[in-house]
Image (tube, rainbow, N blue to C red):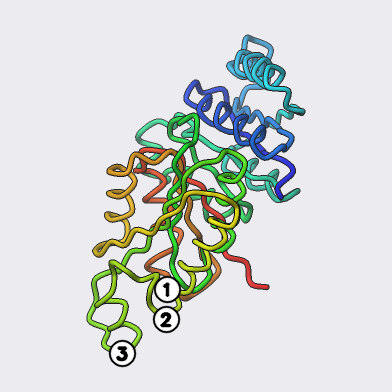
């Protein structure tokens, strides 16, 4: 189980969502917190003035102490896009991020930061556009070939500790593939857990694990564009946390779990999004 949660702030007020959700996650998983403050001030003399990090750190420390979470504080100077991946690579923490308050023109020219972080950070990432607490309903995207396993295991740990309900979501994308397994999936997309397909077996195994832990779990099947259907289910189901795999270094299932799809969902989702890369054994 993860023993540390790395929460990131650059002093922007919107990053409080990451601090609040990250503190909850650490408390839930009995993990420690490292709060990383990134200052991108180009003028060192400006640091002597009141800096937004000071207020955020003071407020965060009060939260950590109130919930009894062990914590450490770090401050690094430099570009967030460079500092955060480098710091994340030092251990196996879950990295918790929120929007960093970039100007719109910078987002247009240089892409949103979350896309860069998903590509560069190998550790699990919890992206928090806004905090949603407590976490009572978790949606796990299941692809069927195992690329979601790490995200699924982490989601199960969170659900077990928080006693959250779990929904396992599989999307059948549009396509004209015509081989036996594809036909079975296409014809049985609303009851895939009853089939002897790879996705059917994955869904049954996940259900068995959840129910053996005493969790409430169900399967949801949808058909259509992957991004649109995941976002649609997230909105309609009013979930508190969305979990999905990321096969960044894998060439299969790219449509389902490519970094761009993951970042599209992270940018548009109405709740925090937990992503974890597929790791080949």
- Image mark for residue 179: 3
Image position of 192 with respect to 98: above or below: below
- Image mark for residue 247: none
Is residue 45 at all visible to an observer of this figure?
A: no
Which quarter of the figure has residue 40? Answer: top right
Residue in the picture at 74% in, 29% down: 74
For the residues bearing labels 1 and 2, Cβ distance under 8 angstroms = yes
Q: Is residue 175 left or right of residue 120?
A: left
Q: Is residue 82 left or right of residue 71?
A: left
N-term mark: 3 or 2: 3
- Image mark for residue 196: 2
Extreme-top residue of the structure: 50
The number of discs equals 3
Q: Position of residue 204 (x, y in %)?
A: 47, 68
Structural distance between the alpha carbons of marks 3 and 1: 16 Å
Foreground mark, 3 or 2, reads 2
- Image mark for residue 200: 1
Q: Position of residue 116 (x, y in %)?
A: 50, 50
Residue in the picture at 46% in, 34% down: 99
Structural distance between the alpha carbons of marks 1 and 2: 6 Å
For the residues bearing labels 3 and 1, Cβ distance under 8 angstroms = no
Secondary structure beneath label 3:
loop
């Amino acid at each position: 189980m993860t023993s540390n949660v790395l929460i990131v702030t650059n002093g922007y007020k919107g990053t409080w969502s990451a601090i609040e959700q990250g503190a909850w996650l650490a408390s839930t998983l009995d993990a420690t917190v490292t709060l990383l403050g990134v200052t991108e001030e180009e003028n060192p003399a400006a640091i002597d003035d009141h800096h937004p990090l000071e207020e955020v750190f003071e407020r965060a420390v009060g939260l950590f102490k109130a919930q009894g979470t062990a914590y450490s504080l770090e401050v690094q100077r430099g570009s967030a896009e460079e500092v955060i991946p480098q710091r994340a690579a030092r251990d196996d923490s879950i990295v918790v991020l929120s929007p960093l308050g970039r100007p719109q023109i910078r987002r247009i020219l240089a892409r949103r930061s979350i896309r860069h972080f998903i590509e560069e950070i190998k550790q699990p990432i919890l992206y928090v556009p806004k905090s949603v607490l407590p976490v009572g309903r978790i949606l796990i995207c299941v692809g069927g070939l195992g690329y979601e396993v790490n995200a699924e295991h982490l989601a199960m740990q969170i659900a077990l500790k928080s006693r959250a309900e779990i929904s396992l979501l599989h999307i059948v994308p549009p396509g004209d593939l015509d081989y036996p397994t594809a036909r079975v999936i296409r014809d049985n997309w609303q009851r895939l857990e009853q089939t002897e397909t790879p996705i059917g077996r994955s869904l049954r195994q996940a259900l068995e694990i959840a129910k053996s832990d005493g969790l409430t779990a169900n399967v949801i099947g949808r058909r259509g564009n992957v991004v649109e259907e995941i976002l649609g289910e997230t909105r309609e189901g009013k979930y508190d946390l969305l979990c999905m795999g990321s096969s960044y270094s894998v060439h299969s299932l790219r449509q389902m779990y490519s970094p761009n799809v993951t970042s599209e969902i992270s940018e548009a989702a109405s709740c925090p999004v937990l992503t974890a890369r597929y790791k080949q054994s």
